Amino acid sequence: MQGDSLFAHEHELYRDSFRRFVAAEIEPFHDAWEAAGVAPREVWRKAGAAGFLLPSAPAEYGGGGGDFLHTAVILEEIARSVVTAVMGFTTHSDIVGRYILNLGTEEQRRAWLPPMASGEAIWSIAMTEPSAGSDLKAIRTVARRDGDHYLLSGQKTFITNGWNADFVLVAAKTDPSAGARGISLLRVDTRARGFSRGKLLDKIGLRGQDTAELFFDDIRVPVGDRLGEESRGFHYLTSELAHERIMIAIRCAALIEAALGWTIEYTKERQAFGKPLFDNQALRFRLAEIRAHVDATRALVDRCTALHLKGRLRAEDAAVAKLWATEATKLLDDLVQMHGGYGMVREYRIARAYTDARPNRIFGGASEVMKEIIARAL
């Protein structure tokens, strides 16, 4: 759909640069990373050197000094190229990095952010547990105060960057009797005694994205490695969920736009019964319907992105954007169908997009949770 773009010339230059980086440093190796279930640390260092980690953090902390639209560029281009083995870049940069920037002391920012920006230190955030997904207040990981340390024990699962992580920002209960009001955020060094990883999780989609189980057995965490105030963690986490959800919506909007483009191109070239598939009226009309859905998704996501840039994105706005954009990825089923058997072959982008899109309706808050958030605001 034609209209004014949110992106300025500087963002498009950044986009061109990242596309070249993807073509040279990611796409040639992506199949191998998917087979391994994880991207190598070297690509993180290359991304850091090229300015693609912490793009919106201030330059004084090693960041790119950009704004949220630089983050949006990375989200869109990873989606359009279906190079999901490096989706963890944005978790590291724009979720964990944002927490540190907003909540950290000046000493923490200066110590923690520059190695993140260079790719020398990889971070993950650990909220989800085997018995606590969207319900954050149900977490069981506990951090007991012991002098100037906490003793951290518990388990986390489905942790992006969990395998490669040098540091993990862990949500734990420092006051188990207080429920949601007893959660704090702690930085854990993965070299610490008592830390261990389970296996890399073998997923049907996002196969190259580093996703792991993490275990904490009485790890001693210095009080100085707590991020923010004690027992304010639930507030911090829920305050940032709108940011995470608009990121997911941006990624999904870009993916379905790209997938529609691939399918139009394919159906115009692919011959069946002596003519292009696109000449079939039923197929063309379905593509037209999908185009309408894709444009509506883009309009909604752009509106919410603009609100976020102004600091005015409400929780229910982000929930609407995430719900609509992630549910819109169901349209990929029809686009796969139009590719016939080739739509099932992972050599084709449409096949990878189909499986990689599915988790978006679960993480960052499941679609059912988004409906509840929206309904409460009515």
Image: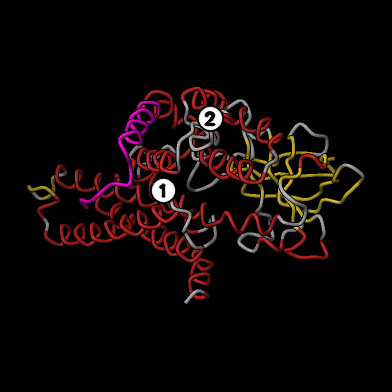
Please state the horizontal and vertical placement of residue 73, each as a whole percent of the image: 39, 40
On whether residue 5 falls in the magenta region, the answer is yes
Q: At label 1, which amino acid type do we have?
A: Arg
Q: Nearer the viewer, residue 135 or 186?
A: 186
On the question of residue 201 being in view, the answer is no
Residue located 47% across and 77% down the image: 378
- Horizontal side of 38 relative to 273 (left or right) equals right
Q: Nearer the viewer, residue 246 or 310?
A: 310
- 248 left or right, relative to 343: right
Q: Residue at x 44, y 31 (%)?
A: 30
Q: Which mark is residue 251?
A: 1
Mark 2 or mark 1: which is in front? Answer: 2
Circle on res. 59: 2
- Where is residue 217 drawn, in percent x and y? 83, 44
Inspect the magenta stretch and tell me whether residue 145 lies in it: no
Q: Which circle's residue, 2 or 1, is located before the other in the chain?
A: 2
Tell me the element at label 1: helix
User: Is residue 264 depicted above or below 61 in this figure?
Assistant: below
